[in-house]
Image (cartoon, rainbow, N blue to C red):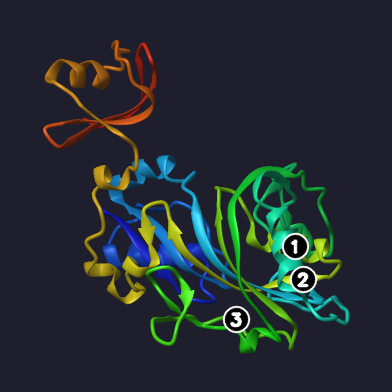
Amino acid sequence: MPVIAVDKPLHLTSHDVVNRARRARKTKRVGHTGTLDPLATGVLVLAVDDSTKVVQFMEADSKDYLAWISLGAGTPTLDAEGPLNETVEVTALDANEIRGVLSQFTGPQKQVPPQYSAIQVGGQRAYAVARAGGELALPARDVTIHSLELLGVYPCVQAAPRTFDPQGWNPAETGLIFTLPEALGEFPTLLLRASVGSGTYLRSLARDVGAALGLPAHLSGLVRTRVGRYSLADAVRLEDLETAFGLSDLDALDFPHIEADGQLARELRQGKRPQRPEVGRHVVTLGGELVAVVDGDGERLKVVRAWA
């Protein structure tokens, strides 16, 4: 009943990966902790069988990315799916000016999701309306961008690095080699390393960074290098899903631990609210076995989910 980090290949949807996992693990009970677009690659965390219970505790995990943003060219999808709907000439780009713009995008902020997204408004999926030629008024959402680092400015995405050292995800001569979508043309391209909170769209960030520079822009490549405690360096290939070990539910939950005695474990499994001084979300164990995930207010524990 493991939690498994998979390296999602290019052009597959997250649902495609879930379906492959169902066949490989011979079960219908497979969930994931956060969608990756078809043109993105990298870490997709899967929960198999009873481990689907922990998905709710991992959906808010922070995520790290490598992002290639091409300037001077916009697309309706905000990525390399295209088609191009706006192109402009790009004059010389100053790295210091770009860093100044990027600094404006760190911290809590409002972000308007892409029209081509699965967000629902009035029972309609935004992407379905967009594909039919329409547009929904998508409200801006609260997101947090923890850090944005400019790794380089290149004449086009084709000239930007594809090989990275998994220790720090810097461009390198040897390391992991990433496959990016087919480029829509030769446009000046920024390579960023980003750490973001849950719900942040890197496609929207590409659009907004371009707008701050006075240019249309699109996300020409995206690799998710980390989700919570799961690094791409440790992710398994789709072909290895059948025999992958993954992590147990307990190891997958990245919260402080409370080691219970028999009485505390019994009370929590009965849904009671025992007195304890802890504050915030914790994992409760008994003899190394998972008992519950709880929220503490400094006086009592409240069960969020219990395990028998």
| Residue 117: image location, x then y, percent | 67, 57
Q: Is residue 225 left or right of residue 26?
A: right
Q: Within 10 Å of the Cα at label 1, are there few (<14), some (14-19), or many (20+) other Cα atoms?
A: many
Q: Is residue 280 left or right of residue 76?
A: left
Residue at the disc numbered 1: 209
| Residue 177: image location, x then y, percent | 44, 83
Identify the mark nearer the N-term, 3 or 2: 3
Q: Answer yes or no: is residue 265 visible.
A: yes
Q: What kind of residue is marked 2?
A: Ala
Q: Is residue 167 left or right of residue 306?
A: right
Residue at the disc numbered 3: 181
Q: What kind of residue is marked 1?
A: Val
Dot in front, 2 or 1: 1
Q: Residue at x 25, y 42 (%)?
A: 250
| Residue 75: image location, x then y, percent | 78, 72
Dot in front, 3 or 2: 2
Q: Residue at x 34, y 67 (%)?
A: 235
Q: Within 10 Å of the Cα at label 3, are there few (<14), some (14-19), or many (20+) other Cα atoms?
A: many
| Residue 254: image location, x then y, percent | 34, 43
The answer to which quarter of the image holds residue 213 is: bottom right
Q: Is residue 197 left or right of residue 126?
A: left
Q: Residue 43 or 240: which is nearer the viewer?
A: 43
Q: Residue at x 29, y 50 (%)?
A: 49
Identify the mark nearer the N-term, 3 or 1: 3
Residue at the disc numbered 2: 217
Q: Residue 307 or 251: which is nearer the viewer?
A: 251
Q: Within 10 Å of the Cα at label 2, are there few (<14), some (14-19), or many (20+) other Cα atoms?
A: many
Kindly state the secondary structure of the residue where label 1 is placed. Answer: helix
- Asked if marks 2 and 1 touch (Cβ < 8 Å), the reply is yes
What's the distance in space between the residues labelled 2 and 1, CA to CA? 8 Å
